[in-house]
Image (cartoon, rainbow, N blue to C red):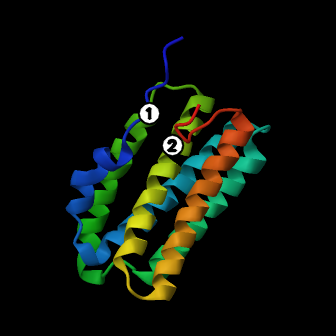
């Protein structure tokens, strides 16, 4: 069996991300989190056994999106740009999952969660305001919590450690 190739999501999405004005990037990422929540819900419909914890992961993605949007929503003047970038980003994301069995798709998502946590850590490091920094760190923790749950349920490790 060939090893599962894990995409580098930041690399895949970089061009799309930088097309979004900086002031609306957190809001853009929040909307990507909502897309991930939708993926989890879709997977939950495919497996009754996996559904309970997949729905927990979906709820975490929604929480991340809600909190990120509350901090830094998409500015009205950037709405069209963000929606265009989201359409591209969603297509790129979906391409990473195509052709893989369900459990591999979910495992790829665990890696996406860990990679996504790094974006929130990056934002945390850019903010002097302690409250904002703390919120970004909490978003990173929520991402990792989903990755850890997936790892535990699938009996695999997305941490890159053996």
Viewer-side residue, 43 vs 131: 131
Disc 2 target residue: 111
Residue shown at 61% from the left, 36% from the top = 157
As drawn, the label of residue 118 is none
Q: CA distance from mark 2 to mark 1?
A: 7 Å
Q: Check the image and report above or below for 51 versus 118.
A: above
Q: Quadrant of the N terminus?
A: top right
Ranked by sequence position, the earlier of labels 2 and 1 is 1
Q: Are marks 2 and 1 in contact (CB under 8 Å)?
A: yes
Q: Residue 113: x and y, percent?
A: 52, 51
Residue shown at 40% from the left, 80% from the top = 72
Residue with the most extreme front position? 162
Disc 1 target residue: 6
What is the quadrant of residue 95 in the picture? top left
Q: Is residue 10 visible from the viewing direction of this image? A: yes
Provide the secondary structure element on which disc 2 rests. helix
Residue shown at 52% from the left, 53% from the top = 36
Provide the secondary structure element on which disc 1 rests. loop
Q: Check the image and report above or below for 108 versus 100.
A: below
Q: Is residue 27 visible from the viewing direction of this image? A: no
Q: Is residue 61 left or right of 52 when viewed as pictured?
A: left
Viewer-side residue, 42 vs 22: 22
Q: Residue 79: x and y, percent?
A: 29, 74
Residue shown at 66% from the left, 48% from the top = 148
What is the quadrant of residue 144 in the picture? bottom right
Q: Residues within 10 Å of mark 1 (few under 14, many from 20)?
A: some
């Amino acid at each position: 069996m060939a090893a599962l190739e894990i995409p580098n999501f930041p690399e895949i999405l970089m061009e799309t991300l930088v097309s979004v004005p900086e002031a609306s990037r957190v809001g853009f990422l929040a909307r990507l989190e909502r897309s991930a929540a939708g993926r989890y819900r879709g997977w939950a419909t495919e497996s009754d056994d996996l559904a309970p914890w997949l729905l927990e992961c979906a709820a975490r993605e929604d929480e991340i999106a809600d909190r990120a949007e509350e901090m830094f929503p998409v500015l009205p003047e950037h709405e069209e740009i963000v929606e265009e970038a989201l359409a591209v980003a969603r297509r790129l994301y979906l391409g990473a999952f195509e052709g893989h069995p369900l459990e591999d798709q979910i495992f790829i998502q665990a890696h996406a969660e860990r990679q996504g946590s790094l974006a929130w850590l990056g934002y945390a490091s850019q903010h002097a305001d302690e409250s904002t920094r703390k919120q970004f760190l909490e978003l990173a923790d929520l991402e990792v919590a989903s990755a850890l749950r997936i790892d535990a349920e699938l009996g695999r490790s997305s941490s890159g450690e053996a």
